[in-house]
Amino acid sequence: ASNDFLKKAGHAVGGDLSGVALIVVDESHNFRNPLSNRWENLFTLISDHMAREGERPYILFLTATPINNTIWDLFWQVMLLVLENRKAFLREGITDLFKFFKDIDKEGEPSLLNDLMNEISIRRNREYIKQNYPDAEINGRKIIFPERLLENINYQLDGTYQGLYRDISRTISEELTMAYYKILEYRKVEKLSRDEEMALGRMVALGGIFRTILLKRLESSVDAFRKSVSRHVEFLKKLKEYLERGKLLTKKTFYKYVSNLDEENEEEFLEELEDIHIEDYRKGELFGDIEKDIALFNEIRDKVTRIDAEADAKLKGLKQMLIELSRNGQVVIFTYYADTLDYIHQNITGDPQFSEIRIEKISGRIASAKRRTEIVNDFMDGKIDVLMSTDVLSEGMNLQKARYLINYDLHWNPTRMIQRAGRIDRIGSPFEKIYVYNFFPEEELEDLLRLVEILQNKIRNIDSSIGLDATVLGEEVNPKVFGIIRRIRDQDETVFDELEREVFGGGERFYQPLMEYLKSRRRRNWSLSLSGYTAGLRGI
């Protein structure tokens, strides 16, 4: 799945897609956003095939996690399967797919999706296989799943930030004006139009998401947080400069040009910016709030700049754990942020006590897929002791030679937790037990969860009032996450199985006992059909 999907698909069959009867899409959850290039490209690929061949190809989606954050992730994958035909399941009693999903979303009960999933899906998770195929073999070897054990690595977030955590988190959640995210609020009008009010609501929601990201990066690592703050200060300074010139600078455009903006490409840069008539705004108030945010961010930056790796309590905890674990097996470390990955890799590989431990890292910044594959192969061959990665490795990679997995950040996305654990919790693991270690800011956890939850509630209130698009909601934290994080902290190992069941519903676990019963009765005229668009009993 990539942005040049059409080109690659054509190249795979010699440039001619005619005669293709089956399209297989691996990791189909990457097609959950209808605004992405890859979603549009796949839709075009299927539509063009139908227009040319006069019939639609068979489409097979493969994924362990079709729901990443909300049920709408699944909705947009189904929309690809049915080419946006909302009435595709009329015969099954679903008159409108959009309304079907909307009603389920309102109920807040994903299990209601089972009626649909029974029509289009076949699922085999570890729980299902253990219950229904206890003697199953692959290549003559019995299928055995290792036991998953959760362990905590507790640390003091306030200790990492030298007693500044609460001041910094309060500034982020309460004191920043976020003027950039509510510019329409400064318009010189008595009342905004309906469209402007909706646009303002979406901007404010994005501001809430940015505050949330800052809190997440605050927890992730000092360096990731420090870099976010520095980048935002530079952005706000440029924002103010270009507002004076009648141009509205966006973050997307800023980051696109920030590293190489010079006289040669400034004209191209300005062409991408939206015109803004600053005289239509309360300029003094707007600029005053931007200056206030710059001052607050500078104050935060000055505080965290003084914190070095030697004083980082979280990093110290990781080093201690790595020394202990690496004596007994290979280790995989996951973090959400490439900045955090670079930080921990640099400070651990530069520490003399790790000179005998072979350590490597992988992130999206390693452009070559070939190089990433080489590193993974070296790990599987035992040439690497510790493999550090962002979530670029959380899908589709076999890392079962590792006995230990360490999550360096909190689990804000439960699906990622399942995907990460699945790298080492695989058929073929040589271990009876595998260990998943999770870092927790022991004393500050509840305060951090409360701050993020307040921000997310505000975003949901905006969504219920005006409706937010997929790009905004895709960054939202699922309300269930807060309870899940607490359960992981309490080392509740049932959370994995429950999440796997919730992520992908389906009634197959009910069908299998019935099938066994029918077999035992040896009724040849009874069979269970799971083909096409139906899943039920035939010939009864």
Image (cartoon, rainbow, N blue to C red):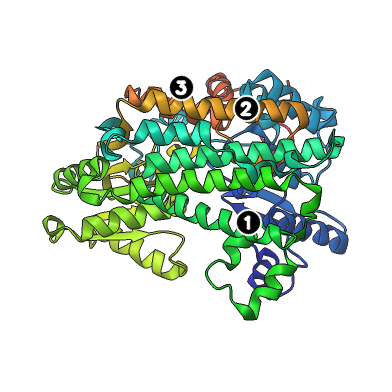
Is 130 on the left-hand or right-hand side of 116? left
Q: Which mark is residue 458?
A: 2
Which mark is in front, 1 or 2? 1
Q: Mark 2 is on which residue type? A: Lys
Asked if marks 2 and 3 touch (Cβ < 8 Å), the reply is no
Question: Dot 3, how many residues are within 10 Å of its Cα: few (below 14), some (14-19), or many (20+)?
Answer: few
Indicate whether 317 appears above or below 9.
above
If you read the primary sequence from the N terminus, does the residue marked by circle 2 or circle 3 appear first? 2
Question: Dot 2, how many residues are within 10 Å of its Cα: few (below 14), some (14-19), or many (20+)?
Answer: some
If you read the primary sequence from the N terminus, does the residue marked by circle 1 or circle 2 appear first? 1
x, y percentage for residue 268?
Answer: 70, 73
Question: Dot 1, how many residues are within 10 Å of its Cα: few (below 14), some (14-19), or many (20+)?
Answer: many
Rendering quarter of residue 76: top right
x, y percentage for residue 151?
Answer: 27, 31
Q: Is residue 367 visible?
A: yes
Which mark is in front, 1 or 3? 1
Q: CA distance from mark 1 to mark 2?
A: 26 Å
If you read the primary sequence from the N terminus, does the residue marked by circle 1 or circle 3 appear first? 1
Mark 3 lies on residue = 483
Mark 1 lies on residue = 239
Q: Secondary structure at mark 2?
A: helix
